Image (cartoon, rainbow, N blue to C red):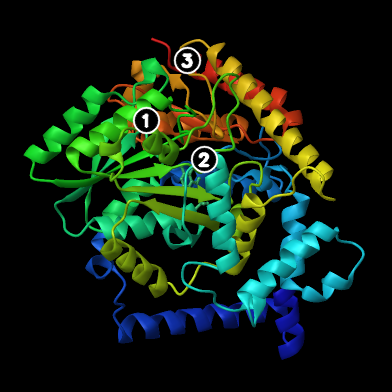
């Protein structure tokens, strides 16, 4: 409207006439374009592997949620006044606050004049100065070494050594744009042809299958055992391996995610040992996705890194190749927008390291803000430092709130008829299993939809809650799930849980036989 008024006064013509001019102009220009030039990027001109890659976290249901949000802004009447986005693990978008110390160091690195300000604590200033000296001329505005700023690589090495009690080395550590980029680097190194395969869990965080599709390789899917809190069964690994091998797939790696997304389990040390033994026998590189290592809520459960488990094992396992991933996006930092992460490799030979370094250098380097965030995560304030009490208060408030939210969500799901939810031991998600009545399954299929997509769309339209259907992560045939994050603000939880429950009752009633 505003621009119409602007052009009307510019051309000194009434608004109706300006609208007619625009319509005529658009018709003429589109005729010109369609007659004169055939676009390259259409039909078969668009890469098949891109078409095949799936990423449900931002798929059909979230797309509809964005439309509904737009409609609500334009006062369309609905039984709710806003959409609650429970589809993405994006903590700060749901009022989970950032950690002050991280923001202070980032601000100081980006605008070093602030080093003269009294607003910032001495430890944050020291931290920023150290990074700026190591980054060299241009600071956070310049490319760094392809592996990352050297003092930040050292921070990561110190962090890993403190965590595991085993040696690490800067040559084995690469700063990446989020964990996603590190995972993509390793996948590129691992797969080389259309009969290459990597084992991935089902349900799976869909990045892995999407990357394999993009690289023209095959996901070799193994099922997690829902009845044993989504643990990994050796017999299932053997089944998946053997059947793909028979189909001519050459398998070179195995992915495990702990704490799990979408399944929320924290794998036991004994389970990790079994997987390492399997990888050793089958000669597989282990890809350990540990981005939720700070997010463990169940008493008695503890995150233990695959690197530590491997180093604790007998000598014959000490050559198993391992790539581990961490991120600035999760934990209690939740700095998803910074795109910070690191990749640590263990037991890679010189040749593999050289090729990995080359791959990293093709991207020049990871973004500097993400690298600085990773430095703050791995070298955070400790007791006695000026920022410690504020840091510790922010950290423990958020983690204890996540633990309460995990408990609330799991209780609410288990109280719904025909719904069961394993313990949310860690990460940021619940993955409840839902019974979908046969008539609803039939209707979904007649619309060309998966039954759990019908359920998730119905939940969204009915109550404004946006979740991701289980089919987007893969699930055992005949079972249905959805994934919800535990991230909505704690004060909204009673309302959100009631929305889940009311919709569920309504859905079962609507479709009951
Ligand atoms: C299991 C898992 N791995 C990797 C990622 C990617 O994280 P990043 O934001 O660091 O790229 C995510 C993001 O949700 C995730 O859940």
The answer to which quarter of the image holds residue 200 is top left
* Circle 2 residue: 165
Q: Is residue 374 above or below residue 116?
A: above
Secondary structure of residue under mark 2:
loop
Q: Does the Cβ of the disc 2 residue fall within 8 Å of ligand 1?
A: no
Q: Residue at x 14, y 52 (%)?
A: 195
Q: Residue at x 32, y 68 (%)?
A: 354
First in sequence: mark 1 or mark 3?
Answer: 1
Instruction: Return the x and y of residue 492 as percentages of the image width and height.
Output: 73, 30
* Circle 1 residue: 272
Q: CA distance from mark 1 to mark 3?
A: 26 Å
Which quadrant of the rendered structure holds the N terminus? bottom right
Secondary structure of residue under mark 1:
helix
Q: Is residue 464 above or below residue 253?
A: above
Q: Residue at x 19, y 36 (%)?
A: 281
Instruction: Return the x and y of residue 186 as percentages of the image width and height.
Output: 34, 56
């Amino acid at each position: 409207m505003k621009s119409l008024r602007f052009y009307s006064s510019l051309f000194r013509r009434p608004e109706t006439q300006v609208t007619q001019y625009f319509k005529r102009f658009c018709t003429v220009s589109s005729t010109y374009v369609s007659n004169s030039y055939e676009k390259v990027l259409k039909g078969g001109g668009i890469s098949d592997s891109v078409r095949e890659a799936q990423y449900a976290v931002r798929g059909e249901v979230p797309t509809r949620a964005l439309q509904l949000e737009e409609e609500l802004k334009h006062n369309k009447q609905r039984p709710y006044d806003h959409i609650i986005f429970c589809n993405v693990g994006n903590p700060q978008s749901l009022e989970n606050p950032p950690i002050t110390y991280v923001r202070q160091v980032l601000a100081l690195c980006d605008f070093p004049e602030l080093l003269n300000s009294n607003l910032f604590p001495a430890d944050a200033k020291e931290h920023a100065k150290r990074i700026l000296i190591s980054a060299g001329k241009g600071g956070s505005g310049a490319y760094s070494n392809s592996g990352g700023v050297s003092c930040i690589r050292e921070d990561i090495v110190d962090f890993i050594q403190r965590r595991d009690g085993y040696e690490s080395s800067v040559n084995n550590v690469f700063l990446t744009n989020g964990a996603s980029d590190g995972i993509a680097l390793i996948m590129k190194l691992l797969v080389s042809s259309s009969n290459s395969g990597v084992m991935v869990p089902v349900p799976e965080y869909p990045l892995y299958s999407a990357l394999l599709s993009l690289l023209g390789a095959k996901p070799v899917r193994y099922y997690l055992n829902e009845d044993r809190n989504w643990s990994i069964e050796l017999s299932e690994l053997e089944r998946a391996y053997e059947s793909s091998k028979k189909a001519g797939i050459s398998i070179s790696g195995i992915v495990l995610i702990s704490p799990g997304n979408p399944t929320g389990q924290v794998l036991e040390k004994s389970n990790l040992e079994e997987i390492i033994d399997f990888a050793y026998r089958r000669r597989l590189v282990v890809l350990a996705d540990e981005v939720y290592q700070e997010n463990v809520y169940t008493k008695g459960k503890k995150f233990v890194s695959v690197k530590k488990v491997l180093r604790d094992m007998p000598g014959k396992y000490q050559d198993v190749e391992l790539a581990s991933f961490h991120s600035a996006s999760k934990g209690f930092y939740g700095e998803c927008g910074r795109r910070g992460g690191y990749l640590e490799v263990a037991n890679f030979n010189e040749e593999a390291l050289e090729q990995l370094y080359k791959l990293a250098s093709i991207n020049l380097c990871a973004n500097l803000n993400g690298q600085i965030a990773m430095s703050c995560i791995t070298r955070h304030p400790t007791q006695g430092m000026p920022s410690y009490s504020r840091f510790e208060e922010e950290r423990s408030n958020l983690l204890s709130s996540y633990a309460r939210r995990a408990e609330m969500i799991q209780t609410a799901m288990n109280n719904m008829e025909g719904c069961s939810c394993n313990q949310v031991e860690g990460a940021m998600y619940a993955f409840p299993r839902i019974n979908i009545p046969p008539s609803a399954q039939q209707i979904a299929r007649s619309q060309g939809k998966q039954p759990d997509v019908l359920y998730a769309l119905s939940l969204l339209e009915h109550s404004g809650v946006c979740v991701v259907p289980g089919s987007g992560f893969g699930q055992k045939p005949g079972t249905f799930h959805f994934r919800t994050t535990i991230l909505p603000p704690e004060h909204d939880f009673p309302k959100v849980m009631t929305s889940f429950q009311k919709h569920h009752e309504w859905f079962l009633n609507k479709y009951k036989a």
